[in-house]
Image: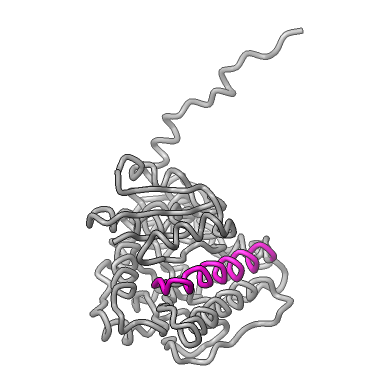
Amino acid sequence: MKILITGGAGFIGSHLAERYLERGDEVYIIDDLSTGSMENIAHLKGNHNFTYYLDTVLNQHLTAELVDTCDVIFHLAAAVGVKLIVESPVNTIETNIRGTDIVLSLAAKKKKRVLVASTSEVYGKRDQVPFRESDDLVMGPTNKGRWSYACSKAIDEFLAIAYWKERLVPTVIARLFNTVGPRQTGRYGMVIPNFVRQAILGKEITVYGDGSQTRCFTHVSDVVGALMGLAECYDAVGDVYNIGSTQEVTILQLAERIKALTNSESPIVFVPYEEAYEEGFEDMMRRVPDITKISNLINYTPKCSLDEILNSVIEYQRRKLASEEMVPDFRRSLSPATN
């Protein structure tokens, strides 16, 4: 098959591209590198089945060509990370809604199959777990920037389902719950790579809030397998599916486990949400998916345990830090200018 991945130089997109290339498919990606990285796809560039474009899906002429070329489109391009979302709400809304509308409208012309990546954030402030795809969504107030992301992704879902119902575009929606693994950056507030890097470097491990909030983390390899399964299952069309793990852990427990696995002496410190993000920031205290629906459809079961997930990130971050130490800082070697 010919696969198009928008946001393909990102954390999840690069792993998805890698898996399809290993299978022998042709992969095309488009990424503006706003949150993705060339480093994520550098090892793929020598593969004759791999083509990449450094551009945005808002470039409709290029996106149209790629959509026409490919059989299946994975729309992963989006604003990601709580920190980025709080700091850049306009970019978040524009990137998510406009980008998705463009991809779906172009796919509609030739009825190309589209998988739209959504997020567990759309469940908003629900406090009853596990979250089921048919549950009501409980959004926060519009003056809290955090909820702009949830609302924009919910609109993406409405758009995808509308294109299926009204224009028969075969769309599938995947709600992702805290995907983790190698290549994920902590730059935009991703908790595990941040904790791991802090622990390895002997810095303070910064837990936001009191650490009692819980999450369920899923290895990127399990998520990629689920995405491929949904995209290739026609019975999945026109519906929404949670992808995640049901192994719940508090953020404080997570910090303590990472500290133990890295043999770190880093102290664990608590940072108020207002200091980390913005005044009045609202968090989801529990985020647990019900994965019955996707399990029944494609026999999805996450295979990686929490320790396996953490060890994969620790190994990756250690390699990355070692490579950073090997790169000379040329600025230090420059002689002062003389008059």
Quadrant showing the C terminus: top right
Q: Is residue 292 above or below residue 40?
A: below
Would you identify the image quadrant in which residue 179 lies?
bottom left
Residue 314 place in picture, x, y as percent: 36, 51
Quadrant showing the N terminus: bottom left
The residue depicted at 44 percent of the width and 32 percent of the height is: 325
The residue depicted at 34 percent of the width and 68 percent of the height is: 223
Looking at the image, the residue that sits furthest to the top is 339
Q: Nearer the viewer, residue 186 or 260?
A: 186
Q: Nearer the viewer, residue 138 or 306?
A: 138
Dominant secondary structure, magenta: helix
Looking at the image, the residue that sits furthest to the right is 339
Q: Is residue 155 above or below residue 208?
A: below
Q: How many marks?
A: 0
Q: Nearer the viewer, residue 179 or 41?
A: 41
Residue 230 place in picture, x, y as percent: 32, 75
Can residue 219 be found in the magenta stretch? no
- The coloring applied to the image is one colour
Q: Is residue 8 above or below residue 105?
A: above
- Region of the chain picked out in magenta, as a range: 90-114
Residue 101 place in picture, x, y as percent: 57, 71
Q: Nearer the viewer, residue 76 or 207?
A: 76
The residue depicted at 59 percent of the width and 59 percent of the height is: 58
Would you identify the image quadrant in which residue 130 lies?
bottom left
Can residue 112 be found in the magenta stretch? yes
Left or right: 129, with 96 as reference point: left
Would you identify the image quadrant in which residue 57 lies?
bottom right
Residue 83 place in picture, x, y as percent: 60, 61
